[in-house]
Amino acid sequence: MKARNVFITGASSGIGKATAYKFAEYGDNLILCARRKENLNEIAQDIKNKWRSHIHIYELDVTNYENVSSVVKDLKDKNIKIDILVNNAGLASGLDKFQDSSIEDIENMINTNLKGLVYVTRKVIEQMVGDNSGHIINMGSTAGIYAYEKAAVYCASKAAVKTLSDGIRIDVIDKDIKITTIQPGIVQTDFSEVRFHGDSERAEGVYKGIEALQPEDIADVVLYVANQPKRVQITDVTIMANQQGTGFNIYRK
């Protein structure tokens, strides 16, 4: 089978990094994007030591439309077709009641989780429509299904991911383009450290008493949905830890 070109945002850590490894092991080529280019260089070198993937690296801030446009144009100029887009870049910023949350945290989440996803998808889908092929996999969250306390804006931004995916799927129904939303529950990454602005002790408490999902668990599912035959489109997948009932309904042992 011909190797596919997989474009992954937020590829420098967590789910994005794990997804890169899964596709590389499967034999696909990678386009790795993130703000932390030094991390991408380390990941790319490690992957090259293990497998034969062709890897392209871009320092990318998904909230900057000019930056997004430049990366996609560079790939086009190099005649590199994007077969799969994994919109993984996202974050939570703060954990406060809505009335107490800072405008900076609110804008950070909306700009990254929604506007950034829209920017990247809008540029990449142009090529996919022209080629009449492609698969866009958007990383949502159980927070987009079940709102929880002190996370109104984060939950809203992730609910928007699901709705946007559904809307795009309708718009490209006459094309051979698949749209999937992955909605993970509690996953042990640096997500909580980012949410708590570097407070590692508070971040560790999020995972205390529960066997959280690991990034590799989500990456397994991403690869699975991408490997379905042409006739099969998996629209939504929700993945939660075993002791997780809803988005933030967790039993801690």
Image: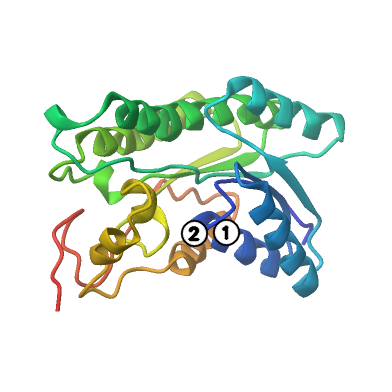
Query: What is the quadrant of the N terminus in the image?
Result: bottom right
* Numbered label attached to residue 14: 2
The amino acid beneath tag 1 is Lys
Query: Which of the labelled discs sits on residue 17, or is there none?
Result: 1
> Relative to 58, is 24 above or below?
below
Q: Amino acid at mark 2?
A: Gly
Q: Residue at x 68, y 44 (%)?
A: 83
Q: Residue at x 61, y 66 (%)?
A: 22
* Residue at the right extreme of this rendering: 78
- Using the image, determine if residue 85 lies above or below residue 216: above
Seen at 15% across and 64% down, the residue is 250
How crowded pointer 1 is (Cα within 10 Å; few <14, some 14-19, many 20+) is rated as: many
Describe the element under mark 1 as helix, strand or loop.
Answer: helix
Quick one: quadrant of the C terminus?
bottom left
Q: Which mark is residue 29?
A: none
* Along the viewing direction, whichever of 81 and 214 lies nearer the viewer: 214
Q: Is 198 on the left or on the right of 57, as rendered? A: left
Whether pointer 2 and pointer 1 mark residues with C-beta atoms closer than 8 Å, the reply is yes
Using residue 175 as the reference point, say whether residue 186 is left or right of it.
left
Within the image, what quadrant is residue 252 found in?
bottom left
Work out whether residue 148 or residue 177 is closer to the camera in this orientation and state it: 148
Q: Residue 97's x, y, as percent?
A: 13, 36
